[in-house]
Image (tube, rainbow, N blue to C red):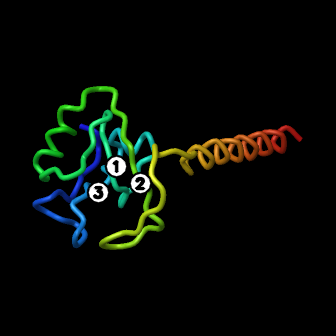
Amino acid sequence: GLGFNIVGGTDQQYISNDSSIYVSRIKKDGAAYLDGRLQEGDKILAINGKDLKDLRHKDAVELFRNAGYDVSLKIQRRLQPQNGPVGHQGDGESGGLPLAAILVPGLALAAAAVWILLRYRQRM
């Protein structure tokens, strides 16, 4: 699967008077988690160019299940993490650099520097 759960639809509104589809959970080590761009609370506007407006929940689920290997999502980013309904800003493709893309190489460099320092001290 794509590695995330969705909520919403015309028959299961997540937010009052809003039948949009939202990301409710990103599964650890799933495709969405590993990609790093999608966030819990994001509104999904379209999948592979197919508008998700005014769909029942089960119909939206079927679109995701049949999306294929290469999936393109058009999302509307939430303003900030919160529990329950979320605010949004702008629409468009998700983007940006995941925090892990910055932290992991930085931590690897720091670990390498410590290792080199310890090896250098042992030889003295």
Which mark, residue 76?
Answer: 2
What is the CA distance from the residue labelled 3 to the residue labelled 1? Answer: 18 Å
Picture quadrant where residue 64 is located:
top left
Identify the residue at image location x=14%, y=53%: 57
Q: Is residue 39 left or right of residue 48?
A: right
What is the CA distance from the residue labelled 1 to the residue labelled 2? Answer: 22 Å
For the C terminus, give its image quadrant: top right
Q: Is residue 87 left or right of residue 3?
A: right
What is the CA distance from the residue labelled 3 to the residue labelled 2? Answer: 9 Å
Q: Nearer the viewer, residue 88 or 5?
A: 88
Give neighbour class at mark 2: few <14, some 14-19, many 20+ (Cα, 10 Å).
many
Residue under label 1: 28
At mark 3, the secondary structure is strand
Residue under label 3: 22
For the N terminus, give its image quadrant: top left
Identify the residue at image location x=37%, y=56%: 42
Which dot, 3 or 2, sits closer to the camera?
A: 2
Residue furthest right as drawn? 124
At mark 1, the secondary structure is loop
At mark 2, the secondary structure is strand
Relative vertical location of residue 29 with respect to residue 11 in this rendering, above or below: above
